[in-house]
């Protein structure tokens, strides 16, 4: 069995997930980079390996229950452990122009689109947590980071993009539920907002880079034993739910 910590990062082919994978590998982890496009995730892993990082690719669509079960089976078979889970993969299926009623109004939003957004942004993290926490328990240590968004904050909930906002609010509920159930155990779980970052999802208008956004996620993934659990953070500082 590995002595090195094994980190699973979903949606690691590009954007914030790729930066998190690189930074966790630079911190000494073996990183399993998970992506749904085989060519893209293998190329992203190859690039990081070429620059000396200890990473492997794993092809899985996180919304596919059998693919998540196969991922858990690989972790058990090949490594006998999973220490860190970063639930980063997510979709933003709404139109970005908030002047459009399809983007702006909960009264006309397509419920099928809301369901598809939930499947990736909230239910897939639930499935991954259910699949991987048993391995963390066996090894007596675990860190889970649910990559959330300020758009999921109930305290800030305004109009626009109801599918994405509801999915991240549900993800935050998953963080609280899991933290409550794991209280007193050596497994910590937190939600982290990376801030508005220049990625395919964030667009070109953001001031922060994917590297900036990755920092707070890596901080939560490597929390010491006296670190927090069940919180919501941006840049290592607590924010409102
Ligand atoms: N960028 C921002 O401003 C911002 C702000 C707040 C929160 N966030 C959050 O930060 C995280 C990363 O966002 P990002 O900006 O880096 O987004 P991104 O560039 O769109 O990357 C998302 C990644 O998730 C993958 N993915 C999507 N659905 C998947 C599925 N079903 N199975 C496996 N992988 C899947 C994508 O793979 P494909 O290449 O195959 O599509 C892609 O690699 C997300 O949770 C997002 O909600 C971002």
Image (tube, helix red, strand yellow):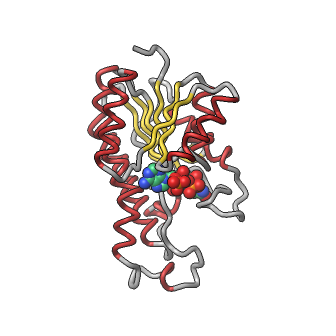
Looking at the picture, does residue 206 appear above or below residue 128? Answer: below
Corner quadrant of residue 99: bottom right
Question: Which residue is at a point 61% across and 41% down the rendered structure image?
Answer: 44
At 45% from the left and 65% from the top, the residue drawn is 165
Residue 66 visible to an observer of this rendering: yes
Relative side of 51 to 158, left or right:
right
Residue appearing at x 39%, y 72% in the figure = 113
Quadrant of the snapshot with the C terminus: bottom left
Q: Position of residue 66 (x, y in %)?
A: 29, 45
**In the orientation shown, which residue stands out farthest toward the front?**
39
Closer to us: 202 or 217? 202
Q: Is residue 232 visible?
A: no
Taking the image as shown, residue 130 lies to the left or right of residue 117, namely left
Q: Quadrant of the N terminus?
A: top left
- Side of 128 where 105 appears, left or right: right
Residue at 33% x, 51% y: name it.
64
Residue 127, image x and y in percent? 31, 46
Q: Position of residue 159 (x, y in %)?
A: 49, 76
Q: Nearer the viewer, residue 30 or 102?
A: 30
Which of the 4 image quarters holds residue 109?
Answer: bottom left
In the displayed structure, 226 sits above or below 130; it is above
**Which of the 4 image quadrants contains residue 81?**
top left
Q: Nearer the viewer, residue 82 or 236?
A: 82
x then y, percent, for residue 238: 52, 46
Q: Nearer the viewer, residue 55 or 88?
A: 55
Q: Is residue 179 above or below residue 93?
A: above
- Total labels: the figure holds 0
């Amino acid at each position: 069995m590995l002595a090195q910590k094994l980190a699973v990062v979903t949606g690691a082919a590009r954007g914030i997930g790729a930066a998190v994978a690189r930074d966790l590998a630079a911190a000494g982890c073996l990183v399993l980079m998970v992506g749904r496009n085989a060519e893209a995730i293998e190329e992203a892993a190859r690039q990081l390996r070429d620059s000396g990082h200890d990473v492997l690719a794993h092809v899985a669509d996180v919304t596919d229950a059998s693919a998540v079960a196969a991922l858990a089976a690989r972790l058990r078979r090949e490594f006998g452990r999973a220490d860190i889970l970063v639930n980063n993969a997510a979709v933003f299926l709404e139109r970005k122009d908030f002047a459009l009623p399809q983007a702006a109004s909960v009264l006309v939003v397509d419920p099928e689109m809301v369901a598809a957004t939930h499947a990736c942004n909230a239910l897939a993290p639930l499935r991954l947590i259910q699949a991987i926490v048993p391995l963390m328990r066996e090894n007596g240590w675990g860190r889970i980071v649910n990559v959330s968004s300020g758009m999921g904050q109930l305290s800030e909930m305004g109009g626009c993009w109801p599918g994405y906002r509801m999915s991240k609010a549900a993800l935050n509920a998953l963080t609280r539920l899991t933290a409550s159930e794991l209280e007193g155990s050596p497994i910590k779980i937190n939600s982290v907002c990376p801030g508005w970052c220049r990625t395919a999802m964030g667009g070109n208008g953001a001031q922060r880079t994917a590297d900036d956004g990755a920092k707070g996620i890596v901080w939560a993934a490597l929390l010491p034993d006296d670190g927090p659990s069940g919180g919501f953070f941006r840049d290592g500082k607590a924010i409102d739910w």
